[in-house]
Image (cartoon, rainbow, N blue to C red):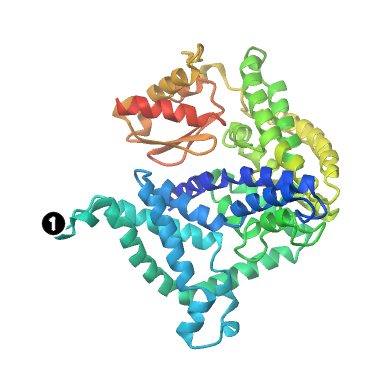
Amino acid sequence: MMKYLQRIGRSLMLPVAVLPAAAILMGIGYWIDPSGWGGDSPLAAFLIKAGASIIDNIPILFAVGVALGMSKEKDGSSALSGLVAYLVVTTLLSTGSVALLEGIKPEAVDPAFGKIGNAFVGIISGIVASIMYNRFSNVKLPDALAFFSGKRLVPIMTSVAMIVVSGVLFFVWPVIFTGLVSFGKGIAELGAVGAGLYGFFNRLLIPTGLHHALNSVFWFDVAGINDIGNFWSGEGEKGVTGMYQAGFFPVMMFGLPAAGLAMLHTAKTKKKKQVASLMLAAGFAAFFTGVTEPIEFAFMFVAPALYLVHAILTGISLFIAATFHWTAGFGFSAGLVDFILSSRLPLANSPYMLLVQGLVFAVIYYFLFRFIITKFNLMTPGREEDDDEAVESGAVTGNNKFAGMASTIYDGLGGGANVTSIDNCVTRLRVEVKDMKAVDQKKIKSTGVPGINVVGPQSIQVIVGTNVQFVADEMAKIHKK
């Protein structure tokens, strides 16, 4: 079950990666016309509406992205089926359709059905579509119906399946919606404390990939909070809307890079060069884009107590930002790009105070991490015992460094005799193997990757960084030979 949920989390990365485009378009539009929201500038209106076309259709992006990511061959027909699934359920359970089914006036329909077009239903649509693809994409029908065989059958079966799902959701969705709203309101009613709790659990769930489920409640319009959508559209309360985003900026832009510096300074002298290369790249990614996995996975499993401290500090950061009503938002993650783009949005409130908070958090992260690492002798990067290090160095040089890196990692995973499937998310290779005992972690680590995460008897993740796609592509080429 955990493995399946992790696959869903990985699949969500594809549609989530589209959000920076919306952030750039809307951010520039609001920058041009921060008071009129496009009303005083045709160019601003054009850019804002272009960005809104993405933000407003996140559920559809989720349906398509999850269907594609969860299907066994990642074929385009699975993505089409995800769209079909979403259209079926949102049409059948729209307010008008439900009113017709129940024989009542539209205004008397349960308000839950007015929110049926949400990220949660988009994810369900994608899951159902992927199941139908995996089950029916190779089915051969009798000659008379041969045209509808195989991949053409998938959207048809998806439609049928979603009629059944819609029937279930007709009774279940109002209950789910009420529960989600109650949970969201329960946290929201706690104000700054609620924001802090959300930040804590958001980081704590990163290793499992389940943070996406938590994020969907607060960031998107599942429970009526829709913090990202409302912040970027200007619909909300200044100083309040954005409270589930703002506190991440001090951590991602300043705290984690400072943690990386602490790990560099506590590394063994002869290993500082290798750690410096890792932490410089990871720190820049965290500061500039808000992608923090390269740093977090560097200590998440080798020093879990340190990661718990990081989760607590993240919660404190969100609490402080919410307490003082400092707000900024992001379309992708809390890095410099999104900070600049969101800083002049109508609902941004004293955003530059987040930079001041970030500088304070950089100091806290650095000294706290350095103290804990040295006090408890934690085996963070560069502090491993010499006999635990790989004797063979697979450090990659030359023009095609990704091909060399992929070759070394592939061999370390046991090669073609052991590797059964290769996939990737934003920063991690996700590999299925036949026998975990055949994996040579020392050889994999010799490439300089930030870390390795064994998530099951046959599942292993290799944290590469933001260039993971190029490594994954090269590994796929090797695997096909």
- Residue 448 picture quarter: top right
Q: Position of residue 322 (x, y in %)?
A: 80, 54
| Label tally | 1
Residue drawn at 45 percent across, 17 percent down: 404
Residue found at the far left of this picture: 143
Q: Where is residue 106 in the image (x, y as percent from the top left)?
A: 56, 82
Residue found at the far bottom of this picture: 103
The residue that disc 1 covers is 143
Q: Is residue 292 visible?
A: yes
What is the crowding at mark 1: few (fewer than 14 residues within 10 Å), some, or many (at least 20)? Answer: few
Residue drawn at 67 percent across, 63 percent down: 225
Q: Nearer the viewer, residue 371 or 84?
A: 84
Q: Nearer the viewer, residue 361 or 378?
A: 361
Q: In which quarter of the image is the C terminus?
A: top left
Residue drawn at 57 percent across, 20 percent down: 385
Residue drawn at 64 percent across, 49 percent down: 51
Q: Where is residue 73 in the image (x, y as percent from the top left)?
A: 34, 43
- Residue 308 picture quarter: top right
Is 201 placed above or below 292 here? below
Give the residue type at disc 1. Asp
- Disc 1 is placed on an element classified as helix
Is 380 placed above or below 331 here? above
Q: Position of residue 54 (x, y in %)?
A: 59, 51
In the image, 248: left or right of 69?
right
